[in-house]
Image (cartoon, helix red, strand yellow):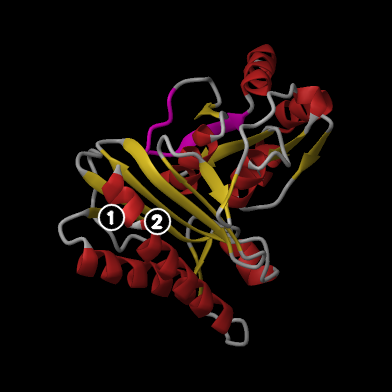
Amino acid sequence: MNQFIERTQLIQEWIYDAAKLIKSSFEENLDIQQKSNRNDLVTNIDKAVEKQFIEKIHQFFPGERIMGEEGFGDEFQNLDGIVWIIDPIDGTLNFIKQQYDFAIMVAVYEDGIGQAGFIYDVMQDKMYSAHKGKGAYCNKKKLPPVKDLSLKEGLVAISSALMSKEEGLARLVGRASSGVRLIGSAGIETAHVASGQLIGYIAASLAPWDIAAGKIIAEEVGLIYTKMNGSSIDLLQKNPSLVATPTAHKEIIMLLNTKK
C-alpha cells in the first residue's frame, strides 16, 4: 500500500500539469476528430495529455502497463501486475462545447484490485482522490461515509445515452428519485455521488477508463459500484454501470428488473 501512497504527489503534479495544458488550449483552434459517432469526439489535446502521462509513467515506473482511452498504451488481455488506467479528458464533448464540466482521471490497479484513484474536476479545481483502505478526499479534506439514502431522498444522474436509448427505464428511475441531473462526465458525476450531492449515477455503457478511478473513490465512502444488473464491473470491457448508496442501489436494480 505504501508504494501507492508514495506515488500520490507525483500523480497529482502530473494531473495539474495536464490541466495547465488543457486550459492553455482554450484560445486555440482544436483538431477535432469523430470516433464512433458525432457525439464521441477526440481532440489533439486529449491525445497530447495521454502521451504526456505515458511518458511520465515510463520514466518513473518502467515496466508497468498503461490502459489509455486514446490507444497510446498497451494491449490488455488481463489485469495482472500493476496497471495504470487513464482518461486524459473525461467529458470531451463538454470540453469542446462548454470548456466546463470535464475531468482528468487516473487510477492504479494491482492484479485487478484498485489501489489509488484520482478525479480532477479541472474548472472547479477539485481533486478527488482515494487509496484503498485509506478513505477518500476532496482537496485533502476527507469525505465522510455517504448517508445511506433511498432513491426518493436524493437526486440521481443518468447518462444522456441511457436517457435516449432507454427512455422508459430512465423515466422509471427518475420518477422514483427526487430528480434527475445530467452532467456529461462520468468522473464528475461519480465524484458528486461520492461527495453526497447525488445518491446515484447510471450509465448505459462506460469504458474502463470511465470507471476505474471513480470506483475506488466511491467504494472508499461506502457506495456500491456494479453493472446495472448487480454483477461485478469488468475493467477489460465496457459496462452498463450503476454507482449508488446501498439502499438506492438495491432499489434501482429492482426497478430495472421490473422494467424487464
In the image, what residue occupies the spot 56% across and 34% down?
Answer: 221
Residue 41 appears at what percent x and percent y? Answer: 53, 63
Total numbered labels placed on residues in the image: 2
Query: Mark 1 = which residue?
Result: 66
Dot 2 lies on which element?
strand
Q: Name which residue lies at 53% across and 39% down.
A: 205
Residue 212, quarter of the rendered image: top left
Residue in front for this viewpoint, 153 or 233? 153
Residue type marked 1: Ile
Residue range corresponding to the magenta coloring: 232-244
Q: Which residue is at a point 47% across and 45% down the rendered structure image? A: 130
SS category of the residue bearing label 1: strand
Q: Residue at x 46, y 46 (%)?
A: 213
Q: Residues within 10 Å of mark 1 (few under 14, many from 20)?
A: many
Q: Which residue is mark 2?
A: 86
Q: Are marks 1 and 2 in contact (CB under 8 Å)?
A: yes
